[in-house]
Image: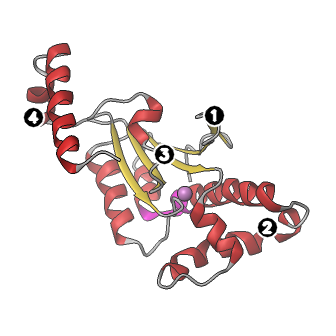
């Protein structure tokens, strides 16, 4: 495990190498950001948006929470979404889950963890809505299918937000994508076609 001192030293080295490749990199980025993507992903440390998509600082606006949830009363997410759609005019919003998600697993196992139980409650609603399908599966494949269903359900929640409904009503082009990441091979895959309207 690197020490904090090492992290700061790594940072200086990264800044030096970045400048070496592009001497105006920080100058350009400090003036403005114009990302085309909003990433709504899981907080899991193994799923870093920029690294797994090969995007540079400035190229993706990111919101992460436990189990990549889109909850209609979450002002944090709604504020990020509104800023990304209305001001930054991102053209793609991706909800990105991952197989083996600890949040999804905790929701499925229904063990009490404290305040987070209220957050995970929403995943249990997804589970309840798909019980006949899920109950045909066992162990990891059941959890993994619930991870997929959760992503698609959150994409649907996103489609219903006032932010996206308003954007489409005024003719703005913005698409929602439901993606899933495999920790085992590092691959991102689309779970369904893009949602491009109300
Ligand atoms: Co997760």
Residue that carries the numbered disc 4 in the rendered image = 31
Q: Is mark 2 within 8 Å of ligand 1?
A: no
**Distance from Cα at disc 2 to Cα at disc 1:** 27 Å
10 horizontally vs 84: left or right: left
> In the displayed structure, would residue 86 be above or below residue 143?
above
Residue that carries the numbered disc 2 in the rendered image = 130
Which label sits in the foreground, 1 or 4?
Answer: 1
Residue that carries the numbered disc 1 in the rendered image = 185
SS label for mark 3: loop
Which region of the structure is painted magenta?
157-162
Which of the labelled discs sits on residue 47, or is there none?
3
184 horizontally vs 68: left or right: right
Q: Is residue 78 visible?
A: yes
Residue 196 percent location from the top left of the image: 55, 43
Q: Which of the image's four quarters has the C terminus? A: bottom right
29 horizontally vs 42: left or right: left
Q: Do the residues labelled 2 and 3 touch (CB within 8 Å)?
A: no
Q: Earlier in the sequence, mark 1 or mark 4?
A: 4
**Distance from Cα at disc 2 to Cα at disc 4:** 47 Å
Of 165 and 28, the residue lying toward us:
28
Q: Are marks 2 and 1 in contact (CB under 8 Å)?
A: no
């Amino acid at each position: 495990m690197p020490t904090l001192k090492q992290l700061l030293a790594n940072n200086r080295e990264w800044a030096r190498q970045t400048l070496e490749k592009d001497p105006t990199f920080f100058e350009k980025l400090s003036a403005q950001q114009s990302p085309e993507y909003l990433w709504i992903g899981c907080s899991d440390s193994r799923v870093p948006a920029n690294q797994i998509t090969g995007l540079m600082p400035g190229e993706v606006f990111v919101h992460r929470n436990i189990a990549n949830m889109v909850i209609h009363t979450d002002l944090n997410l709604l504020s990020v979404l509104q800023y990304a759609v209305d001001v930054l005019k991102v053209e793609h919003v991706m909800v990105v889950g991952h197989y083996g998600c600890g949040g999804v697993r905790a929701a499925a196992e229904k063990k009490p963890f404290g305040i987070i139980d209220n957050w995970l409650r929403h995943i249990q609603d997804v589970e309840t809505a798909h019980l006949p399908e899920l109950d045909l599966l066992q162990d990891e494949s059941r959890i993994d299918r619930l991870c997929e269903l959760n992503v698609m359900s959150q994409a649907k929640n996103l489609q219903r937000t006032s932010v996206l409904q308003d954007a489409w009503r005024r003719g703005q082009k913005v698409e929602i994508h439901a993606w899933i990441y495999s920790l085992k091979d590092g691959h991102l895959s689309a779970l369904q076609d893009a949602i491009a309207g109300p």
